[in-house]
Amino acid sequence: MDIQVQSFAVTNLRRRPMVVETGGFVAGFTPDTDNPYLNYATPLPRSEPTEQDIAALIGIFRERGLLPRLEFAPQAAPAVAPALRAAGFDTEAVHEYLVCTPYTLMVPQSADSPHVESPATDEEFAELDAALAEAFGGVFAPSAQGAARLRRTQQSGGAVLFVRDPQGGIAGGASCSPSAEGTAELSGVGTRTAYRGRGIAAAVTAALTETMFAQGAGSVWLEYSGDGSRRVYERVGYRPQGTRLYLSLPHAQQP
């Protein structure tokens, strides 16, 4: 699964508005933000980069004033992490990823399960972006660009779903990328604090996963942020399969 997830990561980055490829790496950039989570690189599976390859990659980020940063499945390219660390890159995080297939998916059947909808209007995309910003504790601010990215995800073959709160606003939601290499990434599952513990994350996750299977994906994968969210995803049918590594070059190490 590591090779499939890493191949997906390469293809998904190539969908970014600006893409640069060099020395076995693909760097994808989002011009309207300097957010490091939207501007990063990933290696091709089985890449064996040289010092020159890594220096060229660093230069691509430096010329844009961005933090040199990578996300990848390390077992799909075992030579990459040691080479990056030798060049001064540090570990930001190591995240386990979980995978669901049509054979493991368990859709909540309770009559009390929250009703899941797709956003259709500019107002709904904007409200969902705001709900997710709140759910993730201000890691990113709600913006017109964030709402537009959600709309592009839906229009390009992915899926975006949400659950309303009792007042008609949005309590939480998530999105799933268009599939590639037989799989798709589900991300940004978030619920506003006031509405947690009501099955919203499970309902949205299951519905998004089911939607991607109906569109032909053979699997869907995601990363989780803690034991609580992991239990939610496991109840829906997600199972551990591997890890993803996040590396960046500290400012003090940059020439």
Image (cartoon, rainbow, N blue to C red):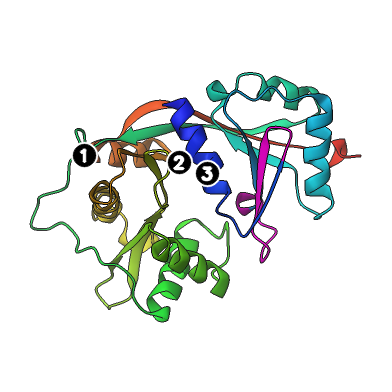
Task: From the viewer's perspective, tell me whether residue 94 is left or right of residue 51.
Answer: left
The kind of residue tagged 2 is: Ser
Task: Quarter of the image for the N terminus: give it.
Answer: top left
User: Is 122 within the magenta?
Assistant: no
* Mark 2, residue position: 225
Q: Which mark is residue 11?
A: 3
Q: Which mark is residue 105?
A: 1
Q: Are marks 3 and 1 in contact (CB under 8 Å)?
A: no
Check disc 2 and report its element: helix, strand or loop.
Answer: loop
**What's the CA distance linking mark 2 and mark 1?**
20 Å
Furthest toward the left, the residue is 111
Instruction: Say whether disc 3 or disc 2 marks the residue closer to the N-terminus.
Output: 3
Residue in view at x 19 percent, y 33 percent: 103
- The percent coordinates of residue 185 (x first, y second) are 42, 45
Residue in view at x 52 percent, y 44 percent: 11
Viewer can see residue 43: yes
> Magenta span covers which residues?
22-38
User: Is 30 within the magenta?
Assistant: yes
